[in-house]
Image (cartoon, rainbow, N blue to C red):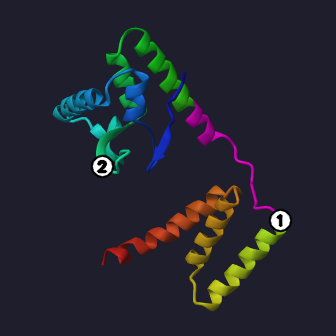
Amino acid sequence: MNGLKVQDFHGKQVIDSRDVAQMVERNHYELLKSIRQYAQYLNEGEIPVVDFFIESTYQDGKGETRPNFLITKKGCDMIANKTTGKKGVLFTAAYVTAFEEMRQALTAPRTPVLPEGVTFSSAVGFMRLARRVMLDMGGTPTQIGMMMKETLETCGFPVPTSFKKQLEGQMSLFEPLALQ
């Protein structure tokens, strides 16, 4: 019954308005009209619409671009509050479950997953070699640190918080230069 799929959109968890329309058994066009009305009310109340609804598009079966919305949990709450009866209850249960599953997946501890045949020691060997090459090419310590961080994250290894903070501090030193 839960046909809702939560997806990540630039760090926000969202559900496609087409899926919501199908779940609440409404015409997608009619749901879009309602969402646009909600967005107008939010704008009038000086409440950020993107906390609820994000305008988007998709390609239909004929390859034509069509409008849709990416709906956050707050937006789903709003739609659910406007939908009554069995449809409202089933939609609420489906979107709450879908968002909870996404939250659990995002917060679950990750087990390092190396490509087949790659061991921790070979990953460390790769990082040593990459460091040496980067130094030979004139790489900065910050660039080498970024490479190390990205390699660890790609392999699913935890990156120490102190290392991340130090690296972020180093990167912030270069921000004024980028603005010039």
Q: Residue at x 51, y 28 (%)?
A: 3
Q: Earlier in the sequence, mark 2 or mark 1?
A: 2
Q: Please state which of residues 79 and 165 is positioned toward the viewer in this rendering.
A: 79
* Picture residue at 25% right of the left edge, 35% below the top: 47
User: Disc 2 designates what residue?
Assistant: 65
Task: Give the vertical position of 94 relative to 6 (above or below).
Answer: above
For residue 84, what is the image quadrant?
A: top left
Disc sitting over residue 117 in the figure? 1
- Res. 98 visible in picture: yes
Query: Observer-nearest residue: 107 or 166?
Result: 107
Q: Amino acid at mark 1?
A: Gly
From the image, which quarter does the C terminus lie in? bottom left
Q: What is the three-letter code of the residue carrying label 2?
A: Thr
Question: Crowdedness of circle 1 by 10 Å Cα count: few (<14), some, many (20+)?
Answer: few
Specify start and end residues of the magenta stretch as a single range.
Answer: 101-117
Q: Is residue 160 left or right of residue 31?
A: right
Spot occupied by residue 136 in the image (x, y as percentages of width and height): 64, 91
Inspect the magenta stretch and tell me whether residue 104 lies in it. yes
